Image (cartoon, rainbow, N blue to C red):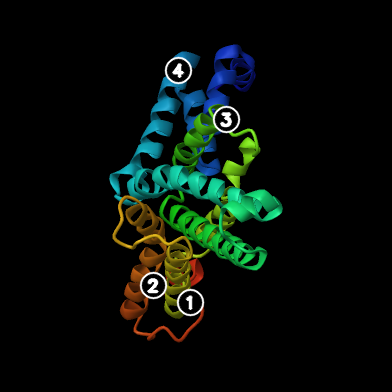
Amino acid sequence: MGDEPNGERLMKSTGWALVEAAARLLARDEREAVLGDLVESKENAWQGLLGVLGLVFRGQALPWKSWRPWLAGFGVALPSSFLLMGFSLSVSWSYLTIRCPELLRKSSLTLGSGSLVLLCQALLLIGWSWTGGFVVGSLSRRTLWASTLLCYSPCLFCLSRFRVESLSRFCLLLFLLPAIWGVHQGLRISRLKRNWAMILAITITGLMLLGWSSRAHHWWAPPRWTLDWALCGPAWYLVATARRATSKAGWGGSDGLWSEQREQQTGMP
């Protein structure tokens, strides 16, 4: 495998230190093979660095040939972050309303009805955030970094321009915890059980419609209904994919969650 002392000295140089750092972006087995080949070929450090970076780039670009990372990043993560920040602000304002008697009187709500509105909004925020995160996690396993960037960039933008004195700017981020939880579950579980997906989608849709009626909002009035239905999209996407998965497997939806392990057993993507 070449002159071992020379190879060790090369690896200790600045150029080879960069090569080793870039190679950490590769899978472990691939990284060891690539570094071994570079030592045997006796290429200089900068040629090796360009070769390793080329491999990294091709590996990162390969998943983008599919529609899944595009849908996860630009169809769910980016628009949902804006919409969920707005709804997080609405939940925070509802909480402030029931805590402030003057605001409660102006809103024409009682403490009980205001608390019910807040509860429905909080559950809806959790549902929208979790389902959106689940879809992003399940679709962008290898490109999660891009979906994360597309989600957090609008958050940083809005945080820097938030100017509501009675509320903390961090109230915009109420959706993040359930969204992260959803991403974590999406990485573990490919598809939900059909019955659970249907119950989840119907519950979220019902809470949305209840929110419209509680604020005397007509269902046909744009753009509110279009934005709310957009946030319901991931929940109904889970229903659609769960139906397809169970019909292909022929199990009728009576089994447990459709997991990665089951996909591996059946050989389905």
Q: Position of residue 177 (x, y in %)?
A: 61, 51
Q: Which residue is mark 2?
A: 242
Residue highlighted by disc 4: 43
Left or right: residue 94 versus residue 42 is right
Q: Nearer the viewer, residue 153 or 214?
A: 214
Sequence-wise, which precedes: disc 4 or disc 2?
Answer: 4
For the residues labelled 3 and 2, the Cα–Cα distance comes to 42 Å
The residue to which callout 1 is attached is 196
- Identity of the amino acid at label 2? Ala
Crowd rating for badge 4 (residues with CA inside 10 Å; few <14, some 14–19, many 20+): few
Identify the mark at residue 163; answer none if there is no mark: 3
Name the element at disc 3. Answer: loop
Residue in the image at 63% along x and 49% along y: 103
Q: Quadrant of the N terminus?
A: top right
Q: Amino acid at mark 3?
A: Arg
144 relative to 164, above or below: below
Q: CA distance from mark 3 to mark 1?
A: 40 Å
Q: CA distance from mark 4 to mark 3?
A: 56 Å
Q: Measuring 39% from the left and 56% from the top, which residue is drawn there? A: 228
Q: Nearer the viewer, mark 4 or mark 2?
A: 2
Instruction: Give the mark nearer the N terminus: 1 vs 4.
Output: 4
Task: Tell me which amino acid carries mark 1.
Answer: Trp
